[in-house]
Amino acid sequence: MSLFSRLLNLNTGNIPLEDFFTELVAYLFSTNKGILYAWLKELNLFDANAYLDAHISTQREFEPVDGQIRSGISNIIDIVIELADENSCDIIFIESKVGSKAMFGQLEDYAKVLNSPLNYRHKYLLYITRDYDPKVEKDIFEGITDCDVQFKQLRWHQFYLFLRSQPDTMLVQEIILFMSKYNMAHNNQFSSIDIIALANFPTALKLMQETMLHKVLTKFEKVLGRPRNRASALTQVDYNGQYIMVVDMPNNWWGMLGFVLKTDSLTDYPRVRLGIQVHPSSPRREEIIAAMKKVCKQEKWKSWEGHGLNDSRAWSSIIREKSLQDFLSQPDHIIAIEEFFLEALGELKDIRNQYPDLPWKAIMANDTDEIPEDEIARTFPEDEEPIITPPPELTGMATANDTESDSRKALFAEELDLKHQLKVLLSSDNYDEDAEVEIGDKLDIVRTKIGSRTVEEAYGAMAY
């Protein structure tokens, strides 16, 4: 294990991996300008040989500028590199992502800051990620007139290969070992581990679904409300490395339950999690955060952990989670995980009862004015409620059994009617939780009668 890996492990929970690695790279550039200039030359950004000096800073804050997408939010740049020659200065913003992706509007806002009246000759915005997260340059510069900023996207494994070509110093070797441990050294080839994961994912997916459906789903709906549709859980795997069901609540906060699949290293285990999270722009953030802090201080909820509760820019949360490793000794993993979810939901119900004035009421996923724009962009590429395309037997294209076809037509019509009743109830001022549960139970019965997974997928927009 590298020295830096040991240091990070000693500070688990205090220093995020992403921030820790940012400081390593910045320190390397600060202490070895030759490596910095060689890297810039390899990227073909500037004539690095012409620079007399370079200044590197991290987590540097720039005030909001006019036209920002994330209105009023300060811009914290991971790494800022200022390069000086005899006559002028150039500047580079580096946004680094290790295990996460850029928030909605983040890169666009950074481009606007760079394009504002800053006294630099050349301006670059670099977006460097561990994982695949392609960006389109014209989208980042959309709405910027007379733009003098240049954009370049890179992957950390490219920087890893560059370091391997540099003079062998202790610092360089330690960073190489650190990058290798935390999956920043991979190339564009499927490894044997990747192939095994692909082959076994359908089986693992069914196991996860079995722990989250039935009793757990029923209790989740009673405590927080009806979640987004099933497809959004798979979308979360792509965007956040999590297979979770999410319920949206007013004032930009939400509840989530499921599996955190992405790990920092190959030896780590996925985590099983229940939590509630609030957006930085929530109009009731102060009240929600205050309640979260009180929860974490109470002995009866000592298993709940707070994250980002003292950072006004964070997507703050309280979570109850366990490593999947903790369940492997149990004779039935599904039952053990299900029991954990039910216990955690029981605790969350007690939290809700103790803080009833928080905006707990679930909202429909298509009430987009209540959902943070960045969350919508990351989760719903198109409208939440897709256009319904009936299967062939409902259009007269397959009528071999007219009686069965008529029966299924009636079931689908009943399901659509129940979904409409649910929407009306949830948008009504006279919300009744018992009525919501009753309609949900009827929907489950109808869907059980419909039965076919193919039909369920064709109809889309079905909650768990």
Image: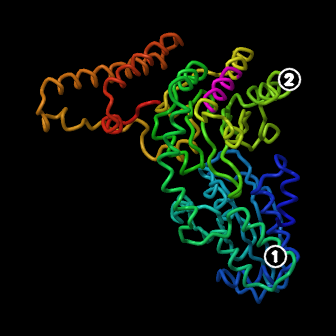
Q: Outermost residue toward the bottom?
A: 49
User: At label 2, which amino acid type do we have?
Assistant: Glu
Q: Secondary structure at mark 1?
A: helix
Q: Nearer the viewer, residue 53 or 112?
A: 53
Disc 1, disc 2: CB below 8 Å? no
Q: Earlier in the sequence, mark 1 or mark 2?
A: 1
Tell me how far mark 1 sits from mark 2, CA to CA.
45 Å
Q: Which residue is mark 1?
A: 173
x, y percentage for residue 313?
74, 44
Q: Nearer the viewer, residue 214 or 273?
A: 214
User: Does the magenta segment cover residue 339?
Assistant: yes
Quarter location, residue 215: top right
Please give the label number shown on residue 299. 2
Magenta-colored span: 337-347
- Coloration mode: rainbow
Q: Secondary structure at mark 2?
A: helix
In the image, residue 440 above or below residue 321 = above
User: At label 1, which amino acid type do we have?
Assistant: Gln
Q: Nearer the viewer, residue 430 or 229?
A: 229
Dominant secondary-structure state across the stretch colored magenta: helix
